[in-house]
Amino acid sequence: MSDKFFWFITTLALLAGCQSLSPKQPNQDTSAKPTDAQWWKEALVYQVYPRSFQDSNGDGVGDLKGIISRLDYLSSLGVDMIWLNPVYASPNKDNGYDISDYQSIMKEFSNMEDFDALLKGLHDRKIKVFMDLVVNHCSNEHEWFKSAAASRESPYYNYFHWWPAEKGKPPYRWSIFDEKGDAWEYNKATNSYYLHYFSDFQPDLNWENLILRQEIYKMMRFWLDKGIDGFRLDAIAFCSKDTTWPPLPEEYKGNWPMYYASGPHLHDYMQEMNREVFSKYNIATVAEAMGDVDRVMKFVDPERKELNMAYYFEAIDFGYLPNEYKMPDPKGYDLVQWKKVYAKWTDAFAQKGWGTMYLANHDQPRMLTRWGNDSPEFRDVSSKMLTTFILSMRGTPYYYFGDEIGMSNIKFDRVEEYNDIELLTNYAQVKAKGGDLKRFLEGMKISSRDNGRTPMQWDATANGGFTTGTPWLKVNPEYATVNVALQEKDPNSVLNYFRKMVQVRKKDPVLIYGDWQLVDAENPAIFAYTRTLDTQKRLILLNFKATSAEVNTTLDLSNAQVLIGNYTDAKPGKSLRPYEAMILELK
Ligand code: GLC
Ligand code: CA
């Protein structure tokens, strides 16, 4: 075997400054990469929400020049790939997830020249780029829709789904972002209703139309030919519809998204897309998938030739009360059950395909508040624990901007402070039903997605250094003490721990390709698992609680070595302090 099959640990030069934390070097020259190794399995993805990363011109909105000004920061993190939320032209009613022109850049973010400069800047630093592609729907301001909505004779009429009014009322379809919950909207000029699974300004594209699909594939090639490295396919599971429009099947009652994710030609389209586009490039693709293991697996089973990766919702949606919109269970979440969810999915991807790991993104609150502890006492240590978790699981990690400094939920008190269409729609629905608005807003302090969209906290100057103007969404006042500048100076900061953990993962094939096995499954406080590759074994111990806890295992820790730990004086052992995390090399 040539040495390209081996990874050797090198000195972690980057971390030279952090003596108290400096990781031990695992001995791993016996662990080979598996034959199905792929760059995107080894990559660490960092998500940049462009609107909230850095404003360059004082209009309060983050932009491409802003990201360009932070390229060295991105490079200093050691991440391999950036996922950019949509930067295409958009009226921004769903912050870019309503695209009015797929081949130009949103005015607020600047222009194609800056996009090209950003792409080059990232590539020069060996960082790849994922574009977020929203093709289940577009904006009602897209030229296709404007033309279609003007006349049934328009060549674009069949780019959308219509129900002619002469046939009476359309069969009920539920909508995600519609106050009335109705996915059909009447359009006078054509005397017909158009379909919108999301808001009425996000008309669904008609994938049953081959001409539309070809148009989308052409647009994908445009971006790939520019040199981008992959796509995140937004809401893609919804793209195929049964256009005989049968009544919604009873079995999906209360769970319409699952029905929407079962369209008759969904996987034919994924395979066609792969044949016509993806197979011609060395790229990565990830689906925002829906549903159970069987459904999600279909996207990523390599034999089916569809996509590379998918993320699933079962773990991230855990701990909410049933039948309510993201209302956190006041009892908190049951760690034992949560571990079982991870075990189920991780085991499934061990058989086939490849998984993803994330605790936050632009549709989620801050991971620290939701899964850790944002009190002054525990915020740092629990942030580091969660980082250790994300980066030691099996599956490509997707890490959300700001989590590397331990940003927390802003917890708005008033509905007027929110911007997000999802929250505003749900608020209006609770209000219309005469529901308890106070209770709703309390719950949203934990779960609403605007918590994860507040601007990046760069330093202690006004607005955290994000903008010199008025930010589009309030900056979390914690910026005075939680910011990049302060953490750069502290070798034990959350930020420097993230950098170190990135290196630990990158240099250790056991953490990337190793088998995963849950340890002490019934432990109510500790999430523990092993990763094993050939003769190499790691034990990961994570205390998810604010009290000390003991792991119950027969594994012999007497010769174990700490590769990384979130307490500076970490020692191998079975008892863990509050939120303690460590990765042990077992011998
Ligand atoms: C996806 C996006 C979300 C958006 C929705 C509609 O779920 O992640 O932000 O609102 O699709 O496009
Ligand atoms: Ca700006």
Image (cartoon, rainbow, N blue to C red):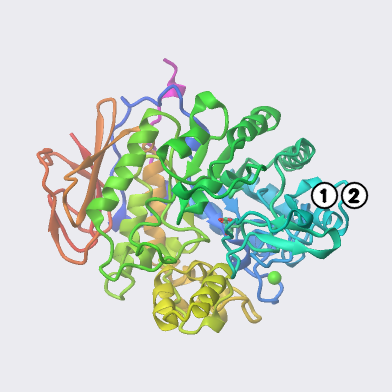
Instruction: Establish if 80 lies above or below 453.
Output: above
Overall secondary structure of the magenta section: loop
Instruction: Establish if 171 lies above or below 108.
Output: above
Q: Residue at x 42, y 65 (%)?
A: 326
| Front one among 93 and 252 | 252
Tell me if 187 is positioned left or right of 354 in this view: right
Three-letter amino acid code of the residue under disc 1? Tyr
Is residue 6 one of those drawn in magenta? yes
Measured Cα–Cα span from mark 1 to mark 2: 7 Å
Is residue 16 one of those drawn in magenta? no
Q: Which residue is mark 1?
A: 157
| Front one among 97 and 496 | 97
Q: Residue at x 73, y 54 (%)?
A: 115
Instruction: Establish if 35 lies above or below 237.
Output: above
The stretch in magenta equals: 1-11
Q: Which residue is mark 2?
A: 153
| Front one among 482 and 551 | 551
Tell me if 171 is positioned left or right of 112 in this view: left
